[in-house]
Amino acid sequence: MTHRGDTRAEPAAPVVISVDAMGGDRGPVAVVTGLSYCAQAHPDVRFLLHGPKEELDRLVARRKGLAGRVEVRHAEGVVSMADKPSQVMRNGQGTSMWSAIDAVREGAASVVVSCGNTGALMLLSMMRLRKLEGVNRPAIACFWPSRNPGGFNVMLDVGADVRADAADLVQYALMGASYARNGLGLAVPRVGLLNVGVEENKGRPELRAAHELMPEAARVGGFAYVGFVEGSDIPSARCDVIVTDGFTGNVALKTGEGTATLIREFLGEAFRATPLSRIAALLALTSLKRLQRRIDPRRQNGGVFLGLNGTVVKSHGSADATGVAAALELAVRLARSGFAERLAARVASAPAPGEDASGQEQAGGHDA
Amino acid sequence: MTHRGDTRAEPAAPVVISVDAMGGDRGPVAVVTGLSYCAQAHPDVRFLLHGPKEELDRLVARRKGLAGRVEVRHAEGVVSMADKPSQVMRNGQGTSMWSAIDAVREGAASVVVSCGNTGALMLLSMMRLRKLEGVNRPAIACFWPSRNPGGFNVMLDVGADVRADAADLVQYALMGASYARNGLGLAVPRVGLLNVGVEENKGRPELRAAHELMPEAARVGGFAYVGFVEGSDIPSARCDVIVTDGFTGNVALKTGEGTATLIREFLGEAFRATPLSRIAALLALTSLKRLQRRIDPRRQNGGVFLGLNGTVVKSHGSADATGVAAALELAVRLARSGFAERLAARVASAPAPGEDASGQEQAGGHDA
């Protein structure tokens, strides 16, 4: 278990990101272009790029500044969006996704990024990287635009598993708090448990049980538990981390995205409605572009798989170069913070429900 | 069971709406003002208004055109937002909410509207109006802004019960289709089952079981089943009715509202950002107001309790006069369509899972 005194220090070793070039809706061109944006912003970062060598070498050669910083690892096969995860698990060796994950497994890179099939990526990651000791169900965490100073909240699980019992929800709180600490730079993240009301007697039995366990987990995990929160709190400043099961989280995420897209379209229609409003749109162009950026899902692209021996960033399948660059940016930030090691330490230090945690707390410390 | 040949005919008897004047965050002034808007739009509708007689008589006398059309029924007590539903059930007699519901129970009005405590309103409605025969769990349905030609979809359950098994979900589909037929005027509503993916093997066991039962329910219920839908489909044109359990529906509803509010605030900030954008806002005023109306939750105010012997419209607790008027408008539309009788006929005609429905189908007809 790595243990650092200074929580903000950057590790001396250069950061290496493992990138699956294939499997996204827009193919390897979008991935390599996004990679070149990220490489420009971070001259010290190196990349392992996985996919058909000849094609990728050609794409890499076309972009300035990538020479000597991108190593292409040949992989013939591609996991498609239609592939069944269980089949990929059995026959996926030789695909770019498998190769990208294995680079982290071998320690050649610290974070893997893929735009491919989510289910297959999760199953392969679980098989090749294994779950962290003490973790029952891994979770997918995402950023959500919010009124908080940093502009984002973290929500998990948004789709790794449709089930979650009280102990899983407590682990999500620990993992989510760790992620917010390293991904958003918050010292003491505030964690809320998603429910249909804020009263203690509301919701499903597993939520009420998790609610009972949270204060102790908060003490050990170094986060602040704010209690039950509602759907309207997800974009609010009431908390930094929203904990829920993968079914509810997935529906909420897609509902939020769908609502934002609908309003963006309505807004566009409103500005095309009359000649006067078209002039207005021109005048307000800068402000509207700023708004667009604030609610643009590509800018907060990247779900992160938590609870594995290694960090996996899942980019949207439909991500363009800007979206891929955002996912890579997140990967770099997490790699620099030594996130994987910190999370492992944190989870190991957390008590299982009912256990006495006083001894373990000192062993784990407060660094994740 | 009332049975009409012409599905669009208006009943000869005048429409009477029972209105709970108390319990909303803005008090009886907002309710009476909203009532006056609705009364102006519908000169043939009459109202029963429940609450402290002296105060309400004074408020009614102040608004033009209400004389002779509003009968105040005195009720001393008020159900507050903090009251526990179970206590209201035991001691709520003499409250305006109880009185408003009982007017429908007695047949003096056909729809009740209240801005009060949702949990108490649901429990009192179940106790005083009773569940429709064949209904296991009543549900709350709401309208959702969408890309459909009518501008709205229906979603249920959005919070009556956190649980729903496969049979409940099938009943929600029947009730929701009936509601869309009468509330949105759709002949053959398209119904989708909310899940985390559209593939058959996705989601929780009760969803896969309901998925199996839906084609038969659709045949009997006169709706089109489109299969699983995702959160992003809630505001889409893929279906007209979204079926889910009350936990997921409540989270989705509040997430959508929260996201819309956040974007509205960001939009306001964008237009106040620079002098140029402030001029632009002036030029685009009409278009922006139209947009505001399209995403204004007050305009689609009114959750409807389905599955009871009588129609209950729940207005937002924070509704202002415009919001109250929208809820009353919905109540008038449902009363005119003879919705309660149609829904009862429809549910009675539906088969329980596994039953043979061929005989019952002819008895129920296709009028709800």
Image (cartoon, coloured by chain):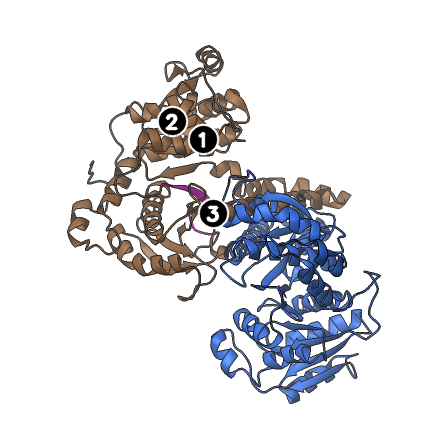
Chain colours: A brown, B blue
Residue B62 position by quadrant: bottom right
Q: Residue furthest bottom?
A: B54
Residue sitting nearer the eye, A190 or A119: A119
Q: Is residue A165 magenta?
A: no
Mark sitting earlier along the chain (3/1): 1
Under tag 3, what secondary structure?
helix
Kindly identify the residue that appears in the image at 39 percent across and 60 percent down.
Answer: A205
Magenta segment: A138-151
Residue sitting nearer the eye, B117 or A286: B117
Mark 3, Cα crowd under 10 Å, few <14 / some 14-19 / many 20+, is many
In the displayed structure, would residue A215 be above or below residue B13?
above
Kindly identify the residue that appears in the image at 26 percent across and 44 percent down.
Answer: A347
In the displayed structure, would residue B220 be above or below residue B131?
above
Mark 1, Cα crowd under 10 Å, few <14 / some 14-19 / many 20+, is many
- Disc on res. A363: none
Q: Is residue B281 left or right of residue A296?
A: right
> Label 3: chain?
A
Percent across and percent down for residue B157 are 57, 58
Gap between marks 2 and 1, in whole Å?
34 Å
In the displayed structure, would residue A47 be above or below residue A174?
above
The reply to whether residue B83 is visible in this rendering is no
Q: Can you identify the residue that label 2 sits on? A: A42
- Disc on res. A247: 3
Q: Can you identify the residue that label 1 sits on? A: A85
> Label 1: chain?
A
Residue sitting nearer the eye, B26 or A26: A26
| Kind of residue sitting beneath label 2 | His
